[in-house]
Image (tube, rainbow, N blue to C red):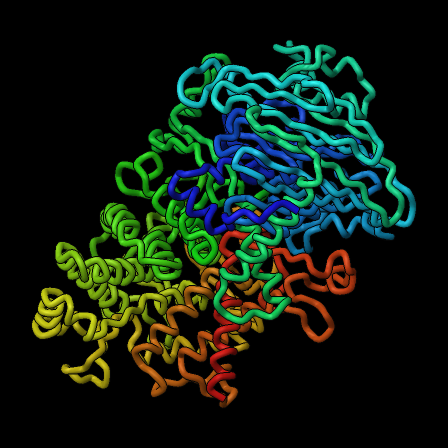
């Protein structure tokens, strides 16, 4: 065992932040899916799923990125490494994850593989992930055909349903990476036979250069063709114009000598299009060699831009085989596989244990700590290289066929300034391998306790001039950058500022605030179309929550005034007010802008509650609703959904002891309250005493808050065993129906997979529990408690007779949310549904998936299976729940 170095993971983070050592140069930045993305789509109709399919991916060079199986790459995706496999039965070499496209799945796009992100440190000094590979033929066609046969009312047909894991006839392929130095990466691949009989496995650790040379462009990031060649003694030499020289060394595997094979990362135009290949050796050569026996597919000169170490392994039942490799700069010295190799893995694992033990302050039990660590690690694994230069994409490339003319006026054509070539936190590593503005906000808050510097970088990056539109709009997501996501970047910056360890980073907060000012102005100018402080916004990420597809035009030019868009803007105001007051403590220049946000808030709150009489409030029902303006009529859309709960989120307390340190703001506030009584109604004074020490800015009054919470905490309405549903359960028996212009529209409670294709196949905000809204609501309830204290209690659940203060209600929501991942008395975790394998199988029971959303009745995980973006907020929630329990024990 080598002497323990003085630098731990936190020291590496500090060195990386200070640019002393480039520890984050390499990481799990290789996408799990590049095919089927908008970036790779050069079609005339924008049908990205069919233009670049999974079948084509093995033979077609990518333009904008790369993908692989549990792989790594450098932060500019120049050199990539991943694992390829063949079980002797599959029709194709397993080089990437398979899944259904949006049109194929009965509930939209869906990965059909079993893989798990088990561990990761922020600098990727240690990474661990697991892939479960069936020993029988992978059922590609069966998965496509059965899901195509099923309708929207049926559940998805999953890989486990095909029976390929019956009898435990599968391999566990565990991939680990450990960094001995920033450019010295140790790789360990452990292949285990879980089946009852000996089984053959072809293992091909694969290394390749991203194709940057075939497009006819020069300039930044269009490097000339590099070279991978045989260095002798089971090693590969790599030369790249920007990255420099590297070497991959391959150790002998249990007496099996690997065969080095070479080809080029070039398109097989002959196979795909009946054209002429630019290179004799193409991207799919290893598939043709291993499965088809085509020895001529690989380069006999033993060089190219893609190479692999091919080993054929026979693994006994219950046994495992370990492959060891080492990727390092050519300047590295020493014996690659001496005893220090495994010792370095042990050291990095111990350091990872030490790091994660200090990340969370609360006393977590062993199971909770495992869950939180997998959530945090999955956030690291979801960092992926994202490359999309919209200007080049619209124009096409000189060496390629010209794109269709319609492209110049089609998707994203008003975002020509967007120039992305960065490592970004993706919502899901397969289903959503692209960023989304409001997802990113939640990712950063989830990361704040583990890697605050990366979280800050992500917030500021999205606001930079090469992402933000010159008009101030933030890009939503690559399918339509011009769509509108809820404006949560300011909230993310504020929370990261508060949650990050160490001294408060005021420079970061100030930089984020300045950019959010520009974005806030865009919202005011573009989404308040009537100038009445009621906002539209359209889609807002809530997909099919309403009776209309809000991303498209409404019937006969009708106008929709949205309770959620308006409330998000009020929330934006309270967040920007809180930030500006914090900055005003040391810089009086922020005092004036603080008063501006205060006045914006009271105007929005007043319009929400009173414009035209009652605004968006429905006195009869005691709930906030969207309002449709059509032919001179105002029609409240009486759908009880989270649209009407979001107004509760905009709540901020102004404490007198804080305001005393900002006298100019305090004076302006006092003047406003005295001279604008019609607007001052939106400011609640404690005990209605003008001399009170505390003031509450909130949309609902106390009475209205109580009425809305009666619905929210009713188990026959919103409250499920696992958090707040996105749509009230009452709409199961009483769907909302709107008859307009001879057309019937209906919204019905659906706890699980969507039965509506509106705005995407797997959209569902009509019943399931969504982590981000619940997280924000629990936060808001605690802010209300800060103002109202123990004097304000509500029944929780409604009708139970059990009264809780609002802090306790927030804590109850947090407890229900973490219950999604905890074992019940039968050993089952609700997020895994009825799966006995996850409950009873020792090889599965500690594995966690963090789904996109959860069934509103039973908590079963749904949608994207690796949505360790906003669902990684579970890590923060476990910490909060543990802290609450510890405090309760101390006070008992």
| 627 relative to 319, above or below | below
* Residue at the right extreme, as displayed: 197
Q: Position of residue 423 (x, y in %)?
A: 47, 38
Residue at 73% over, 16% down: 298
Q: In this view, does 727 lie to the left or right of 540?
A: right
Residue at 43% over, 70% down: 778
Q: Position of residue 743 (x, y in %)?
A: 47, 54
Residue at 34% over, 45% down: 460
Q: Which one is in front, 346 or 434?
A: 346
Residue at 59% over, 22% down: 61
Is any part of residue 301 visible from this angle?
yes
Q: Which one is in front, 265 or 54?
A: 265
Question: Quarter of the image holding residue 574?
Answer: bottom left
| 852 relative to 365, above or below | above
Q: How many marks?
A: 0
Q: Where is residue 549 in the image (x, y as percent from the top left)?
A: 45, 50
| 449 relative to 467, above or below | below
Question: Quarter of the image holding residue 20?
Answer: top left
* Residue at the front extreme, as displayed: 3
Is any part of residue 554 visible from this angle?
no
């Amino acid at each position: 065992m080598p002497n323990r170095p003085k630098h731990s993971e936190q020291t590496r983070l500090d060195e990386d932040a200070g640019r002393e050592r480039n520890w984050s140069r390499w990481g799990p930045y290789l996408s799990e899916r590049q095919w089927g993305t908008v970036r790779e789509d050069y079609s005339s109709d924008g049908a990205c799923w069919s233009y670049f399919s999974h079948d084509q991916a093995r033979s077609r060079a990518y333009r904008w990125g790369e993908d692989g199986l549990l792989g790594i790459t450098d932060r500019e995706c120049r050199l990539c490494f991943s694992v390829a496999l063949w079980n002797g039965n599959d029709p194709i070499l397993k080089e990437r994850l398979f899944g259904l496209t949006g049109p194929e799945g009965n509930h939209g796009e869906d990965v059909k593989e079993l893989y798990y992100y088990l561990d990761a440190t922020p600098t990727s000094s240690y990474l661990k992930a697991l892939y479960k590979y069936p020993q029988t033929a992978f059922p590609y066609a069966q998965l496509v055909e059965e899901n195509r046969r099923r309708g929207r009312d049926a559940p998805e047909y999953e890989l486990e349903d095909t029976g390929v894991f019956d009898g435990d006839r599968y391999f566990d392929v565990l991939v680990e990476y450990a960094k001995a130095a920033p450019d010295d990466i140790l790789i360990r691949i452990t292949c285990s036979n879980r089946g009852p009989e000996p089984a053959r496995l072809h293992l091909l650790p694969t290394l390749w250069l991203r194709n940057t040379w075939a497009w006819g462009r020069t300039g930044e990031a269009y490097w000339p063709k590099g070279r991978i060649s045989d260095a002798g003694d089971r090693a590969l030499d790599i030369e790249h114009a920007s990255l420099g020289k590297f070497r991959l060394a391959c150790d002998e595997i249990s007496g099996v000598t690997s065969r080095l094979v070479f080809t080029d990362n070039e398109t097989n135009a002959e196979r795909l299009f009946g054209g002429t290949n630019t290179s004799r050796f193409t991207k799919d050569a290893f598939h043709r060699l291993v499965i088809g026996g085509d020895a001529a597919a690989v380069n006999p000169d033993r060089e190219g831009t893609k190479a692999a170490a091919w080993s054929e392994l026979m693994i006994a039942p219950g046994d495992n085989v370990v492959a060891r490799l080492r990727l390092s700069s050519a300047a590295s010295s020493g014996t690659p596989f001496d005893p220090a190799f495994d010792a370095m893995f042990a050291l990095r694992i111990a350091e990872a244990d030490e790091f994660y033990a200090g990340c969370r302050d609360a006393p977590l039990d062993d199971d909770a700590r495992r869950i939180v660590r997998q959530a945090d690690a999955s956030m690291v694994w979801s960092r992926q290289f994202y490359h999309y230069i919209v200007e080049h994409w619209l124009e096409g490339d000189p060496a390629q066929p010209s794109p269709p003319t319609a492209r110049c006026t089609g998707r994203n054509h008003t975002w020509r300034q967007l120039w992305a070539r960065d490592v970004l936190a993706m919502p899901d590593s397969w289903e959503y391998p692209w960023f989304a503005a409001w997802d990113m906000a939640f990712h950063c808050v989830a990361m704040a306790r583990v890697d605050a510097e990366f979280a800050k970088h992500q917030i500021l990056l999205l606001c930079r001039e090469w992402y933000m539109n010159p008009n101030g709009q933030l890009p939503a997501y690559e399918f339509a950058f011009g769509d509108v996501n809820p404006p949560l970047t300011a909230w993310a910056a504020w929370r990261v500022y508060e949650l990050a360890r160490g001294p408060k980073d005021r420079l970061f907060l100030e930089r984020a605030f300045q950019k959010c000012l520009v974005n806030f102005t865009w919202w005011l100018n573009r989404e308040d179309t009537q100038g009445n402080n009621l906002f539209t916004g359209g889609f807002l990420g809530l997909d099919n929550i309403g009776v209309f597809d809000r991303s498209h035009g409404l019937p006969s030019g009708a106008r929709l005034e949205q309770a959620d868009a308006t409330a998000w803007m009020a929330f934006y105001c309270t967040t920007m007010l809180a930030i500006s007051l914090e900055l005003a403590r040391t810089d009086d220049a922020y005092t004036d802008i603080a008063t501006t946000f205060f006045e914006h808030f009271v105007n929005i709150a007043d319009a929400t509650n009173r414009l035209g009489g009652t605004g968006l409030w429905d006195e009869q029902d005691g709930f906030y609703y969207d309002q449709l303006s059509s032919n001179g009529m105002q029609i409240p859309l009486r759908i009880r959904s989270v649209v009407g709960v979001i107004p509760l989120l905009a709540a901020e307390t102004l404490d007198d002891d804080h305001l005393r340190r900002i006298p100019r703001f305090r004076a302006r506030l006092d003047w406003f309250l005295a001279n604008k009584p019609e607007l001052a109604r939106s400011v609640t004074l404690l005990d209605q005493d003008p001399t009170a020490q505390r003031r509450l800015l909130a949309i609902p009054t106390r009475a209205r808050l109580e009425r809305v919470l009666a619905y929210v905490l009713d188990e026959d309405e919103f409250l499920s065993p696992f958090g707040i549903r996105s749509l009230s359960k009452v709409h199961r028996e009483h769907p909302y129906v709107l008859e307009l212009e001879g057309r019937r529209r209906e919204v019905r409670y659906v706890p699980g997979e969507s039965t509506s294709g509106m705005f995407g196949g797997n959209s569902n905000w009509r019943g399931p529990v969504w982590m981000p809204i619940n997280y924000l609501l629990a936060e808001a309830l605690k802010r209300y408690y800060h103002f109202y204290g123990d004097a304000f209690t509500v029944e929780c659940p409604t009708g139970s007779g059990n009264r809780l203060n609002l802090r306790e209600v927030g804590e109850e929501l947090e407890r229900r949310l973490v219950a999604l991942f905890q074992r019940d008395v039968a050993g089952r975790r609700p997020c895994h549904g009825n799966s006995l394998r996850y409950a009873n199988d020792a090889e599965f029971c500690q594995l966690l998936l963090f789904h996109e959303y959860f069934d509103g009745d039973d908590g079963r995980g749904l949608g994207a299976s690796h949505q360790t973006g906003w669902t990684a907020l579970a890590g923060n929630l476990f910490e909060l729940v543990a802290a609450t329990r510890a405090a309760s024990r101390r006070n008992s």
